[in-house]
Amino acid sequence: MVYQIYPRSWADGNGDGIGDLPGITARLPYLRDLGVDALWLSPFYVSPQADAGYDVADYRDIDPIFGTLADADKLVSAAHGLELKVIVDLVPNHSSDEHPWFQAALAAGPGSPERERYVFRNGQGRHGELPPNNWLCVFGGAAWTRVKAADGTDGQWYLHLFAAKQPDFNWENPPVRAEFEDVLRFWLDKGVDGFRVDVANALVKAAGLPDWDEPLHLLGDADGVRHEHYGPRPPMWDQEGVHEIYRAWRQILNSYNPIDAAGYSNDSDRILCAEAWVDSQDRLARYVRADEMHQAFNFQFLQAQWRASDLRDAVTNSLNAADSVGAPATWVLSNHDVVRHASRLGLSVGTKRPNGIGVGDPQPDAALGLRRARAATALMLALPGSSYIYQGEELGLPDSTDMPDDVRQDPTWPRSGHTERGRDGCRVPMPWEGDQPSYGFGPSARTWLPQPGSYADLAVDRQVGVAGTTLELYRTLLTARREHGLGAGSLSWLGGYPEEVVAFVNEPAVGERVLVIANLGAEPVAVPGGAQILVSSGPLTSQGLVPTDTSVWLSA
Ligand code: GLC
């Protein structure tokens, strides 16, 4: 069970309105009480914050808005003291344009070794006025920006698959590889337990950087339908060459893992987890072969529509693909890049997954969304494998869907020409105490994004110890999951239920089996006679039946 902390928005120790490492350290007991095994921190490195920290200017230091390296050391040791592992975010595809290497590349000019660390090319057209190819940036617009030459005239272009302030590294260049291997060792030496690897599918580009005329599909196929690319693979994603990078990294991680008395290395102690938006579960499984990463996020599950058959397909495909390479499956419903599932599931079934929701957009049905989100989470947490939860989902937080557009900070909004609102709605600071300024996010009323009024009643202090709240549901689920050993169980589907019911048994190697019924149909369903309810995502009917949009765990 991994809990994702978005450092800007979890806990603000100094009252400047932006979360920080001392704020996180002070709140760590909350995670122990919630019952997770590990936390993953989105980037905290030195950064101009052009993409909320995914634009790194120094991979070996902490941005002053978040604290210092000493604060990071304290966080890691406090977490370890609470038996929580710490996973940090590694951003190897691109740096910030303010990284010293990029500044050196600008100063050194065409043909220099400094420019070789990034992807600089001459433009097309008579005067080089056209970009080197037709690739588009994930956030909108062209993926190339032209720089000035030393004499002030227009010069070469550099590639950025994301914002212009995020130049892509050239992973064919040996010094880039050596640098990141050293960055891995730097954080491993600090005692971190693993890395979440940002856009792990992007590092290597096809030779010659050929044009690509189809859509990019980076943050997934928003309609929730699986699209297999039967033609050529896009030249910027999922190239074969990425795998040798991860094999080299795995060797480094293994060298940090303890050797037991019998001389065997426990090579799953420190882990790598891939963020890779690829076409299919089979392509994803290639990132978690025995000598590469340990886990990879499962975006097919996140994108499944609220239909029993879609969920069953996503689960079956994921388990089969993971089994084919001997890796654990993973499950995730929310993160800092997508509309929170309590809001997403409040849109009509079949709706294309929006990239942000704002004023004037169709608004989710909040009560329906929360009910379905609780049922979806109860289903997810019963699945064998590893689950990732995103800060605030344990409170049932919705996205902020009425945020004024002029406070938005995601580069998606301006780069898309104000057509895609982007990801600010899921990044709003956490409410801890409903009666305090900033709902207890920090010691002042300041928050870098405004909090919706609905967050007061969802604050931690309004939910903790209160029967039936979403926070107590998560705690109950996480405790039962641990007690029953469900993460290491094996799943079999149960027949005999209506089509719109997802029903399965999770049989752990040790621990008692758990029967799970998630009812997505309109009619209430009965539980098997004699089965005892362990936990339910919502109230049962007066006859003890499982109503629509409700999941139950039973011992049987
Ligand atoms: C990943 C991150 C996202 C970021 C992008 C570029 O998709 O999750 O937040 O904008 O990479 O680094």
Image (cartoon, helix red, strand yellow):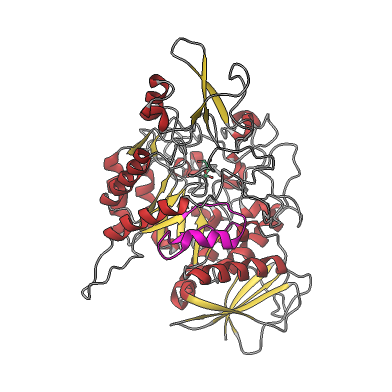
Q: Is residue 501 left or right of residue 1?
A: right
x, y (%) of residue 337?
57, 46
Above or below, 121 relative to 423: above
In the picture, which quadrant includes the C terminus? bottom right
| Residue found at the far bottom of this picture | 530
As drawn, which residue projects farthest toward the left? 261
Of the pair 324 and 420, the residue shown nearer to us? 324
Indicate the quadrant where residue 417 lies. Answer: top right
Residue sitting at x 64%, y 71%: 551
237 within the magenta span: no
Q: Position of residue 43 (x, y in %)?
A: 42, 42
Q: Quadrant of residue 95?
A: top left
- Rendered position, 425 above or below 277: above
Question: Which residue is drawn at the image coordinates 59% and 62% (left, top)?
Answer: 281
Q: Position of residue 11 (x, y in %)?
A: 43, 44
| Residue 202 image position (x, y, % from top left) | 52, 45
Q: Residue furthest right?
A: 522
Looking at the picture, tell me which residue is in the foreground, 416 or 204.
204
Q: Is residue 292 magenta?
A: yes
Q: Which segment did they paint magenta?
A: 274-299
Q: Residue at x 45, y 59 (%)?
A: 2
Residue positioned 40% across, 62% down in the render: 291
The residue nearer to you, when weighing 25 against 353, is 353
